[in-house]
Image (cartoon, helix red, strand yellow):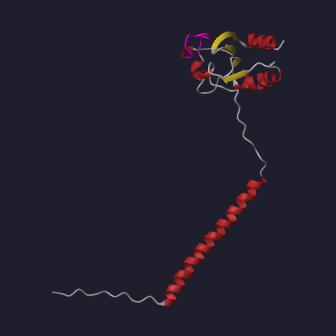
Amino acid sequence: MQKNKKIENPPIEMGNMFKIVLIILIVFGIFYVITYYIKKGNNETYNNQPNTYTTIQYDEILIGSILNQPEDEYYVLLVSQDLYNRYYKNYLSQYSNGNKFYYAIIENGLNKSYFNETSNLKPEDIKDFKFNTISLLKIKESKIAETYEGNENVMKEIIEINK
């Protein structure tokens, strides 16, 4: 039988231990300095940018929620983004005559399912709602009261509302 021999590790000299600790401190110091200057540079870049504020708009709605707005009576304009930006946005903001207007953008992915070749602007269920051109809906007490199809008819009605 052999006796378990104890393997002895050579003793670590104090000089080697000091070198290891010194190297570790230098590495941490380098990372600290690099992190400090990167963070300082990012803060200066951030502080030099003009303040921008996010605004939440409440006027654009989805077609599926046209009957669920808080007002008792309001209008919903179904329009393309281009036409809205070119014509209706400024016009409605200046000449709404106290009436509440919402709009739904046709190109919105959640609205595309309502765009169809044939219109059904007064369905029993909103799931059956379909339109094929720019339209204006008058909503009264969570029901579609009046509808106007086509750019010309929509503009005529907006003018009538503003008289």
Seen in the picture, residue 30 relative to 160 is either above or below; the reply is below
Task: Provide the residue span drawn in magenta.
Answer: 116-126
Expressed as whole percent of the image width and height from the top left, the position of residue 90 reads 80, 25
Q: Quadrant of residue 41?
A: bottom right
Please give the count of numbered marks on the rendered protein.
0
Residue drawn where x is 23% and y is 86% of the image:
4
Expressed as whole percent of the image width and height from the top left, the position of residue 95 reads 82, 20
Residue drawn where x is 34% and y is 88% of the image:
8
Q: In the picture provided, is 104 more to the left or to the right than 155?
A: left
Identify which residue, 95 or 84, lies in the foreground: 95
Q: Main secondary structure of the magenta part?
A: loop
Q: Quadrant of the C terminus?
A: top right
Seen in the picture, residue 14 relative to 82 is either above or below; the reply is below
Q: In the picture provided, is 17 more to the left or to the right than 74?
A: left
Seen in the picture, residue 132 relative to 6 is either above or below; the reply is above
Q: Quadrant of residue 120?
A: top right
